[in-house]
Amino acid sequence: MVKIEKKDGSLVDYDFEKIVSAVTRSADRVMIKFSNEDYNKIREFVESTIKDKNLDIININEMHIIVENALDSVNTKVAKSYREYRNYKTNFVKILDKVYKKRKDLEYLADVENANRDSALVSTQRSIVYDVLNTELYETFFLTEEERKASKDGFIYIHDKSARLDTTNCCLFDMNKVLSGGFEMGNVWYNEPKSLDTAFDVIGDITLSAASMQYGGFTIPEIDKILAPYAELSYKRYFNEYKSLLEELNIEQEQLNKKCDEYAIKKVRREFEQGFQGWEYKFNTLGSSRGDYPFIAVSFGIGTSKFEAMASEICLEVRKNGQGKPGFKKPVLFPKLTFLYDENLHGDGKEFEWLFDKAIECSSKAMYPDYLSLTGEGYIPSIYKKYGRVISLMGCRASLSPWYERGGMNPADDDDKPIFVGRFNLGAISLNLPMIARKAQIENLDFYETLDYYLEMIRNLHKRTFEFLSHKKASINPLGYCYGGFLNGNKKPGEELGTDYLRPMTMSFGITALNELEEVWHQKSLVEDGSFSLEVMKYINEKVNEYKKQDNILYAIYGTPAETLCGLQIEQFRAKYGIVKNVSEREYVSNSFHCGVWEDITPYQKQDLENRFWNYMNGGKIQYVRYPVMYNLKAIKTTVKRAMKFGFYEGVNLSLAYCENCGYEELDMDVCPKCGSNLVTKIDRMNGYLGYSRVKGKSRYNHAKMVEIKERKSM
């Protein structure tokens, strides 16, 4: 019996099954499945080599070389994967060196990769160090050499590398399902709330807990409809309490009921005010285990009952009024607010136009809410008009593709309906289209063949990620997987999720810098042309739809919101292809399908130009324009209503600024004109979401994004 000498000098019996396990893992990393014949070839090669060497004891390093040679004779890609994984000691030295460097950097420099993360906090610093470690592990042991090179060069961008193998991305959380009947959280049983104030507290606890178990946006859809039943419970309690106090006064029944109703309504309104205010405190001050403030969003606006409308109204009032000490109030960032616009409810002269007007007033003061059209043109309105189902946005812009209750990707029949609440995304990988186009030009390659190479690369990465995540246990997010927060979330904690469970969830192909793509190919901007970019988007949609059918994975196409990425892609382009006029001259690239922020165009022109691309990015998109006027409600309302006819998800873009010294506020100021202080806090639209571009005079954004904000004209 041949013995294997391990690194510690101990001896173990030769066991081919251990070789099978090692080479299978290497094959899985490059999406290759070995047949029994392949394993037999490997076995024959290994054991004949051992026999030829005529040794009783073989060193483990020599054994590895034998296995590598065996794999070379069967599949060179797997052999390469095996060698890369085996060099783990050298890799770990490099990894730990990067982790140590980042840790030392944080002692002297702020981290500006995420505007909603305060790197001055020790909890955030720990998270950043963990992110560096996990990112390096992901790149070293999950990616192939080709994928690593494409990512490093910048042809693709793998979002959230530190988290994408740990858990899931953004979601539409089913809060009703979790609350109904009670649930367990942290080994404590929560009963279903019996009043509105308790519902606010419990929903806040659920949100912070569940949001920290994922990365990306955590959306509670149609919050007005969720809160209304608990408002009804509080109303009845207050009504009956007051009635019992007044009954002895022998007041006429009608008058008694009127007084009780007025009292109960007043108390319920107060609970709404305190509840929304409590959320704004909680969601903007309590960091998650990830070291950031969770990206929490709520949608509302189409609930028409008394308490549904009240919930929407007071949510807007609380945000508009802001938080802070008297004279220094300013709006908070979370939760992000999305107003669901239905022309039949909110249009001119309609019953709830008043609520839309309140939303516009709120946007003029706080930029939020953003507006989602349910009755215009395009994908999301078509679903609402046909099925009455709302596709609320996950986080800042991501939206889910249809998944039908019985038919899955396709409806089983005319009565089958799509379901969206409880579903989530499994990660995004973005194409750098200007770089891909430049590569084709420089190397005299066919553009679409070059694009196919990177589309296939993203596809394979998604497939491996999908398979990897299917083996995660439900215990990684009990509120989601065990208590109904996610679709079919009734699993036992130790149960694997499985591939069938993940089928309703999306995986995204991201798109950045169409403006720069057009400049590479036609030497024209999207304002001047855009025909090539349209052609490319049609092609990508057709290709991704083919992948969807072939892989049975719900792929989506996503207009990427580039934060740090807007500067990184320029650095990568310059390193590879230098300075190209109107492509890499600036410090940043344009976001997704948006016109360059520097373009001197009107809001209507921008809407018209970007509308061309709207239905090619149904996995996530937002349209926004800049309002150069001071709180002009009529201008804002007119422009938003126009966007609603297009079927847009529309954001109002101002630049809110507040003096921390005297409390003066004004649009887009860097120095207070009243007291001369530069202790100014500014809120700007990062992309689809808001962030602090300055906090008491100091920047929270990366350099490239700050340059972009300074050059904004149309955004």
Image (tube, grey):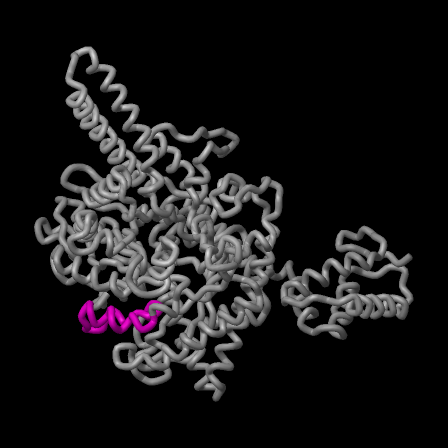
Q: Main secondary structure of the magenta part?
A: loop
Residue at image point 31% right, 60% down: 687
Question: Is residue 321 among the parts visible in the rendering?
Answer: yes
Q: Residue furthest top?
A: 248
Q: Within the magenta stretch, is there residue 594?
A: yes
Q: Residue furthest left?
A: 674
Residue at image point 68% right, 69% down: 78
Residue at image point 36% right, 68% down: 615
Q: Quarter of the image holding residue 226?
A: top left
> How many marks are shown on the rendered structure?
0
Q: Nearer the viewer, residue 233 or 208?
A: 233
Q: Within the magenta stretch, is there residue 442?
A: no
Residue 293 drawn above or below residue 132: above
Q: Nearer the viewer, residue 396 or 22?
A: 396
Q: Nearer the viewer, residue 472 or 220?
A: 220
Q: Seen in the image, is 603 located left or right of residue 437?
A: left
Residue 401 drawn above or below residue 254: below
Percent x, y of residue 555: 49, 64
Image quadrant in which the C terminus is located: bottom left
Image quadrant in which the N terminus is located: bottom right
Q: Which residues are magenta?
A: 590-613
Percent x, y of residue 264: 23, 27
Percent x, y of residue 182: 47, 32
Question: Is residue 562 among the parts visible in the rendering?
Answer: no
Residue at image point 26% right, 58% down: 651
Q: Residue furthest bottom?
A: 444
Q: Nearer the viewer, residue 530 or 247?
A: 247
Q: Seen in the image, is 512 located left or right of residue 362?
A: right
Q: Quarter of the image holding residue 530?
A: bottom left
Residue 197 drawn above or below residue 546: above
Q: Seen in the image, is 267 located left or right of residue 587?
A: left
